[in-house]
Image: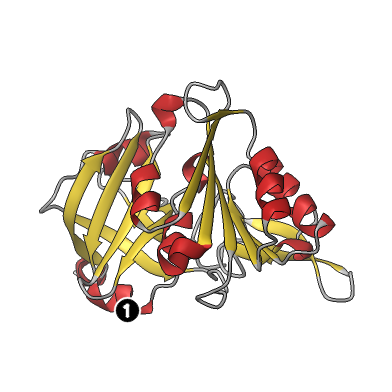
């Protein structure tokens, strides 16, 4: 059948599957042609098995062009992600990728501060691996049980600062306090962030106050992932300040902070 031929072209083998926390999973997908094209900040759109209609958008957490793989890290939040979590190494997954507009990378020797909140943390890892010792990674989680990827950031050579809402791991409180401390210690060339909207808004405000370029990766519900269904429209403004709507899946998910109408 034509549909079978179409889905076969979108099916890729899973190289590894690992449970990171009670809710978070790491999946490595073998897809050489996609890995060659992917850039930090883009995402994949996965179709779970079991009669699901809509795909699940998940940020790219790792790009290994030499091995021809992508890594994604996701949380189980519903039936679709639950089905994805039940896949294992050797299974296949139906995937559209790479999708969206990613981060504009700084110079290799530029100091950058990367801010991740919860499941918005994974897309910060490729940036940390790119900048290495020039990166400061500030991560915020609900509690110690939700913490992910800290060893990965350390392995990249980045300075890591961990915050939790309840103080059960790292520093107690929001990521904005250590962010301002790091800015005052040494002004970075760029701030990148992904996470809950209030965190992004606060990060963008600090970047503006200290006149630092800032890129944010927005999280929105998506239907198609390619800009056709219009579900993920977000309010932005052009260079003249005129309000306009753009699509997170196609024009983003990464935007310059000053573009976004918070």
Q: How is the image coloured?
A: secondary structure
Residue 231 vertical position relative to residue 172 in the rendered view, above or below: below
Residue 79, located in which quarter of the rendered image?
top left
Identify the image quadrant of the N terminus. Answer: bottom left
- Name which quarter of the figure residue 174 lies in: top right
Secondary structure at numbered mark 1: helix
Bin the neighbour count of mark 1 within 10 Å (Cα to Cα): few under 14, some 14-19, many 20 and up. some
In the drawing, does residue 137 fall left or right of residue 245? left
Give the mark count.
1
Residue 53 percent across, percent down from the top left: 39, 50
Q: Percent from the top left, x then y, of residue 186?
A: 67, 58
The answer to which of 231 and 178 lies nearer the viewer is 178
Is residue 158 positioned above or below 173 on the image? below
Residue drawn at (30%, 48%) of the image: 48
Q: Say which residue appears at 56% left-offset and 20% top-offset.
A: 166
User: In the figure, is residue 180 to the left or right of 82?
Assistant: right
Which residue is found at the position 48% from the left and 21% from the top? Answer: 168
Q: Residue at 74% of width from left, 45% of height from top?
A: 202
Image location (x, y in percent) of residue 182: 65, 50
One can see residue 43 in this view: no
Nearest the camera: 189 or 52? 189
Residue 26 visible in rendering: yes
Q: State the image coordinates of residue 169 (x, y, percent, origin top left).
A: 47, 26
Q: Is residue 147 left or right of residue 231?
A: left
Residue annotated with mark 1 = 36
**The residue positioned farthest toward the front in the image shown:** 185
């Amino acid at each position: 059948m034509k549909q079978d031929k179409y889905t076969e072209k979108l099916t890729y083998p899973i190289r590894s599957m690992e449970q990171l926390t009670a809710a978070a999973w790491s999946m490595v997908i073998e897809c050489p042609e996609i890995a060659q094209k992917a850039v930090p900040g883009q995402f994949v759109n996965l179709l779970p098995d079991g009669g699901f209609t809509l795909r699940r958008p998940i940020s790219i957490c790792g790009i290994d062009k030499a091995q021809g793989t992508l890594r994604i890290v996701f949380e189980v939040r519903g039936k679709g992600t639950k089905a994805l979590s039940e896949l294992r190494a050797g299974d296949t997954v139906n995937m559209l990728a790479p999708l969206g507009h990613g981060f504009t990378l700084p110079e290799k020797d530029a100091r950058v501060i990367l801010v991740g909140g919860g499941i918005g943390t994974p897309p910060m890892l490729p940036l940390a691996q790119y900048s290495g010792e020039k990166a400061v990674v500030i991560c915020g989680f609900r509690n110690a049980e939700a913490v992910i990827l800290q060893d990965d950031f350390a392995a990249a050579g980045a300075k890591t600062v961990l915050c939790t809402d309840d103080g059960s791991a790292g520093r107690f409180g929001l990521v904005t306090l250590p962010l301002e401390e790091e800015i005052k210690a040494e002004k970075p060339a760029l701030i990148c962030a992904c996470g809950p909207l209030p965190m992004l808004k606060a990060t963008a405000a600090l970047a503006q106050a200290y006149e630092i370029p800032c890129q944010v990766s927005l999280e929105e519900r998506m239907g198609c992932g390619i800009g056709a269904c219009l579900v993920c429209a977000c309010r932005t403004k052009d260079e003249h300040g005129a309000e306009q709507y753009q699509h997170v899946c196609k024009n983003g998910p990464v935007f310059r902070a000053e573009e976004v109408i918070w």
